[in-house]
Image (tube, rainbow, N blue to C red):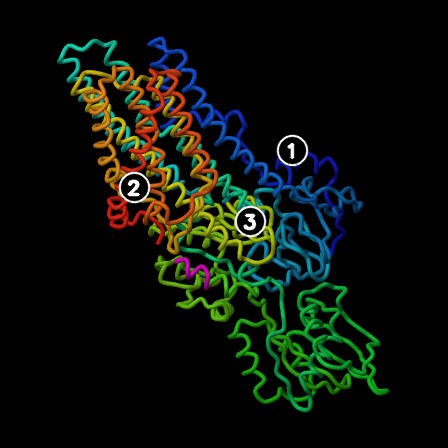
């Protein structure tokens, strides 16, 4: 081999300018731009339009209050996203990797970010490969599990490439840097993460609810305005009605409430050892009905262990393990040696042997060797690939030798051969089968998720026999398919296992399942999992995951084990139940109030609620009901799916009886009690406040009102809203006074009427399947 001098410093500097640093670029949005984006959506548009109309009509106070509500909405969502981004940034921080590089004919150590294509580097045991390196001198064994998902180390010899991000577990070698940064295999996978996106079902839900409510209210406003103008009503009368209808139709606190619910869920999950990177992942976990579980490091421990053995002739299993241990060395930290040593330590008694010589495993010879002294005589031991060890034996292979190898291979094991005896008369001692075993909690996790209505699909880069064996051990039943079948457009849902998959296959698998209507979760730990983790609605990185995988995921498990996934599903479904209660309550009010105001306007020509009273309703109702996010609820045993049609039908079923009750209250106040117009406005205001608070408890569960105890925060918030409304109406603050007795009577009537409506609600909600099952 000719003398290698490496690049000159000048060449390296020029190439660094040309190719850029050896890192993968991160996408970041400026904080102020992210905040401004919170003001550009359907709900903010409607509030902004309301502010504009209020300013045009000279209602500065009302415009200011609405602007504060708009700012509150935006800031709550922005703060929660910033917290999630801070957690993500923390995860992406890792120690800088250094590299041994030959420049100007001298070896030196530089930061890996300064490597360029053409650099000549040296790698050895324990190193993280800093870039894609074409090996031309030496040989190494590389742990590629973080990149390819395969748990077994791979031999990389002269003429082959060691990929960036992998770890050297044996040997040392030198070679030329072939690619850096986003051009490496690692980098291309990280870049693929940026293209992976999944639509937010929650954002779609909010948009559909707002569309439906605004569409209805727009029609109502057109009808009332046209009718009023035909009757000769002035623009000064009609314009306030339009503003009130616009305000009445806006679910002001809906975005902030969903963000707050996600934030509280993130706090709860943190207590249960799950870190939330994207709040949307918590919301989507309630609907998840398919979990694509990566095998290596997720279902399995990514740690080899001895699973089976076969012995021949006079040798016992104890002999086999003691001989294998003598040809192993803990100093190498090789996974195979560590597994053999751990199993040998379990054998009773200590072998009466002393090791006098040892040759570590060499990837080129595929074996390790030891010389032992036993009872005054010396024994040679060889451990390595069965085919290699067999050729070193003086005798023919024992009977059943090939069949034992095949049987272990079919069970997904890596097989070692061990031979011992005088140096010139080695005989086969036995075979050792090693396997990356399932985590102790994997089978329980899969059963628990099955009981929650979630289907498990295992994906792995390992061979199909290994995949079948692991799936059987953890209770995943169903056909095992190859990546080739996936590429040939086989339906993913027809398989329970996919083996031999590449990073692009996992990404494709998630997209295909989403296209078939599944809400997909994906677990993983390696760089190869990152694109699929980002694409999935619920990406879950395990505690040992690489920083790229953690950055791509929505949830990160912070301790070993997978029970955090069950915690995430249960917490998410509790959040769903809370948000369903909020969405139902908000939809009922957004149906009831505009219909009520339109009917009164058409019948009497009067605008019964002023813009100021509508804003006060926001304060006493919409934002008080945000306390639903802390309510005490059960979670569903089946995946929850937002069904806007059923939600609006359920809201309609409750809103119409409540509308009838409010019309009766209006008639009672005007024709029986003889209240003035301003007093009727106050009466209407407190009627809506009381029925809105009662509606929370009416719709929060499918059974009776008090089938479970509400949360303390919810009870305190409801009490506060009611007390505030009573005080405003009784003393005439910002409205015409009614005294104390009338508001209290209305409060009692609203509570009684809600109890009477409970049986109606039970029938409607059960038919529409709106609650936990």
Residue 185 seen anywhere in this rendered image of the structure: no
Q: Residue 126 versus residue 4: which sits nearer the camera?
A: 126
Dot 3: what SS? strand
Q: For this view, does 757 lie left or right of residue 137?
A: left
Give the mark toward the camera: 1 or 3: 3
Q: Residue 139 versus residue 589: which sits nearer the camera?
A: 589
Q: Residue at x 46, y 39 (%)?
A: 261
Highlighted magenta segment, given as a residue range: 447-453
Give the mark toward the camera: 1 or 2: 2
Q: For this view, does 203 lie left or right of residue 409?
A: left
Q: Sequence order check: which comes first, mark 2 or mark 3?
A: 3
Residue 724 location (% of width, % of height): 42, 25
Compared with 523, 33 (above or below) is: above
Q: For this view, does 238 lie left or right of residue 78?
A: left
Q: Residue 355 versus residue 79: which sits nearer the camera?
A: 79
- Mark 1 burial class by Cα count in 10 Å: few <14, some 14-19, many 20+: few
- Mark 3 burial class by Cα count in 10 Å: few <14, some 14-19, many 20+: many
Return the mark for residue 17.
Answer: 1
Residue 190 seen anywhere in this rendered image of the structure: yes
- Residue 449 forms part of the magenta stretch: yes
Q: Which residue is mark 2?
A: 755
Q: Residue at x 31, y 47 (%)?
A: 770
Q: Which residue is mark 3?
A: 274
Residue lying at the far right of the rendered structure: 376
């Amino acid at each position: 081999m000719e003398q290698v001098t490496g690049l000159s410093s000048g060449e390296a500097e020029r190439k660094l300018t040309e190719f850029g640093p050896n890192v993968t670029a991160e996408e970041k949005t400026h904080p102020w731009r992210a905040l401004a984006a919170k003001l550009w959506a359907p709900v903010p548009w409607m509030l902004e339009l309301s502010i504009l109309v209020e300013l045009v009509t000279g209602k500065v106070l009302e415009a200011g209050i609405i602007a504060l509500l708009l700012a509150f909405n935006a800031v709550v969502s922005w703060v929660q996203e910033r917290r999630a981004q801070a957690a993500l940034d923390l995860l992406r921080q890792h120690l800088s990797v250094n590299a041994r590089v030959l420049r100007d004919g001298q070896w030196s150590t530089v930061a890996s970010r300064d490597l360029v294509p053409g650099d000549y580097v040296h790698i050895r045991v324990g190193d993280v490969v800093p870039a894609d390196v074409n090996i031309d001198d030496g040989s190494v064994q590389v742990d590629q599990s973080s990149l390819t998902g395969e748990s077994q180390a791979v031999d990389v010899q002269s003429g082959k490439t060691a990929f960036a991000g992998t770890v050297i577990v044996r040997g040392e070698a030198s070679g030329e840097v072939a690619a850096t940064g986003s051009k490496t295999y690692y980098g291309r996978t990280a870049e693929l993460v940026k293209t992976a996106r999944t639509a937010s079902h929650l954002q779609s839900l909010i948009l559909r609810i707002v569309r439906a409510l605004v569409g209805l209210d727009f029609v109502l406003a057109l009808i009332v305005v046209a009718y009023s103008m035909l009757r000769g009503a002035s623009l000064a009368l009609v314009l306030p009605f339009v503003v009130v209808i616009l305000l009445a139709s806006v679910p002001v606190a809906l975005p902030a409430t969903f963000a707050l619910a996600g934030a509280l869920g993130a706090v709860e999950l943190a207590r249960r050892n799950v870190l939330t990177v994207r709040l949307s992942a918590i919301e989507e976990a309630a609907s998840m009905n398919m979990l694509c579980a990566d095998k290596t490091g997720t279902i399995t421990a990514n740690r080899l262990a001895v699973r089976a053995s076969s012995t021949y002739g006079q040798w016992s299993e104890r002999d086999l393990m003691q001989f294998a241990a003598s040809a192993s060395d803990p100093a190498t930290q090789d996974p195979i040696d560590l597994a053999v040593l751990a199993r040998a330590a379990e054998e009773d008694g200590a072998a009466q042997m002393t090791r006098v010589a040892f040759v570590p495993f060499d990837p080129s010879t595929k074996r390790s060797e030891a010389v032992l002294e036993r009872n005054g005589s010396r024994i040679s031991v060889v451990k390595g690939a069965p085919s290699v060890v067999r050729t070193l034996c003086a005798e023919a292979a024992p009977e059943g030798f090939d069949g034992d190898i095949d049987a272990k291979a079919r069970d997904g094991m890596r097989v070692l051969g061990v031979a011992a005896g005088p140096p010139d008369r080695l005989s086969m001692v036995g075979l050792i089968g090693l396997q990356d075993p399932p985590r102790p909690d994997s089978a329980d996790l899969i059963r628990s998720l099955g009981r929650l209505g979630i289907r498990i699909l295992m994906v792995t880069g390992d061979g199909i026999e290994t995949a079948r064996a692991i799936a059987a051990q953890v209770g995943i039943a169903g056909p095992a398919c190859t990546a080739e079948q996936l590429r040939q457009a086989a339906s993913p849902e027809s398989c329970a296992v996919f083996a031999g998959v590449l990073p692009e296959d996992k990404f494709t698998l998630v997209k295909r399942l989403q296209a078939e209507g599944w809400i997909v979760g994906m677990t993983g730990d390696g760089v190869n999992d990152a694109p699929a983790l980002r694409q999935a609605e619920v990406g879950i990185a395990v505690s040992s995951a690489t920083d790229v995988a953690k950055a791509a995921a929505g949830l990160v498990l912070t301790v070993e084990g997978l029970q955090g996934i069950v915690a995430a599903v249960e917490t998410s479904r509790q959040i769903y139940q809370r948000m369903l209660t909020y969405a139902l309550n908000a939809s009922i009010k957004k149906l009831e109030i505009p219909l009520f105001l339109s009917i009164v306007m058409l019948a009497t020509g009067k605008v019964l609620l002023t813009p100021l009273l509508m804003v006060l309703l926001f304060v006493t109702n919409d934002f008080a009901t945000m306390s639903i996010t802390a309510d005490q609820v059960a979670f569903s045993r089946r995946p929850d799916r937002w069904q806007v049609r059923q939600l609006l039908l359920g809201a309609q079923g409750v809103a119409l009886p409540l509308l009838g009750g409010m019309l009766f209250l209006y008639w009672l106040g005007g024709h029986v009690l003889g209240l003035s117009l301003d007093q009727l406005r106050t009466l209407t205001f407190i009627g809506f406040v009381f029925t809105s608070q009662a509606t929370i408890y009416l719709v929060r569960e499918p059974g009776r009102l008090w089938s479970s105890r509400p949360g303390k925060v919810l009870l305190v918030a409801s009490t506060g809203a009611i007390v505030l409304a009573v005080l405003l109406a009784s003393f005439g603050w910002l409205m015409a006074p009614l005294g104390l007795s009338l508001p209290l009577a209305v409060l009692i009537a609203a509570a009684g009427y809600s109890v009477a409506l409970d049986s109606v609600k039970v029938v409607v909600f059960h038919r529409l399947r709106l609650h936990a099952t």
